[in-house]
Amino acid sequence: MTDRLPHEKGFHISWDQIHRDSRALAWRLDGHGPDDGAWRAVVAVTRGGMAPAMIVARELDIRVVDTISVKSYNHQAQMDAQVLKAPDQEMMGDGTGILIVDDLVDSGKTLELIRAHYPKAHFATVYAKPQGRPQVDTFITEVSQDTWIFFPWDMAMQYVKPYRGSD
């Protein structure tokens, strides 16, 4: 038994690592779009998907980039997902040829909500947890469901106690 809080089983991601992993995601997606391997646009799930989507768009030379804003967390507590801002509907259609990019799929509720609007889009995340994996078409790294991922845009440098022991 442990007295650690659930978020203390952390996976810390540096800027270098998110950049490398996002490039790996782009390479995995390269040539798999429906238009002779090309994608029509990238849609970032804000806010976490913005950095990976920018990197994917750059690597795949995709010039049309939009966002969908979905709120599904209040700090570290999950809540019902709701769309706050949708991408351009004329561009989106049913999602054919569109890459939806997020940093992480956790429960899958955010992507499930987006997939209901754009059923033919391709969903890609850098990281995936088992519960949300059915909502993702392509991802790079799977982590356990009880792992909390600390992204570089959420962090500041500070001392952390050792995982075990007191030294």
Image (cartoon, rainbow, N blue to C red):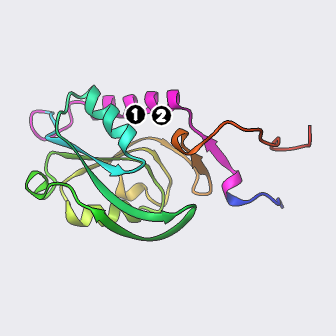
Q: Is residue 134 left or right of residue 163?
A: left
Q: Is residue 117 above or below residue 157?
A: below
Identify the residue at horizontal 62%, vertical 43% (top origin).
11
Looking at the picture, how far across and down is residue 56, in whole percent? 31, 33
Q: Is residue 142 magenta?
A: no
Q: Is residue 42 left or right of residue 124?
A: left
Q: Nearer the viewer, residue 144 or 109?
A: 109
Q: Which secondary structure, mark 2? A: helix
Q: Nearer the viewer, residue 31 or 89?
A: 89
Q: Is residue 124 left or right of residue 63?
A: right
Q: Are marks 1 and 2 in contact (CB under 8 Å)?
A: yes
Q: Which residue is under mark 1?
A: 22
Label of residue 18 in the image:
2
Looking at the picture, how far across and down is residue 91, in whole percent? 10, 51
Identify the residue at horizontal 36%, vertical 43% (top origin).
50
How far apart marks 1 and 2 lie (CA) works out to 6 Å
Looking at the picture, how far across and down is residue 167, in whole percent? 92, 37
Looking at the picture, how far across and down is residue 149, in whole percent? 57, 47
State the extent of the magenta-drawn residues as a range: 7-36
Identify the residue at horizontal 82%, vertical 60% (top origin).
3
Q: Is residue 121 left or right of residue 91?
A: right
What's under tag 1, amino acid-wise? Ser
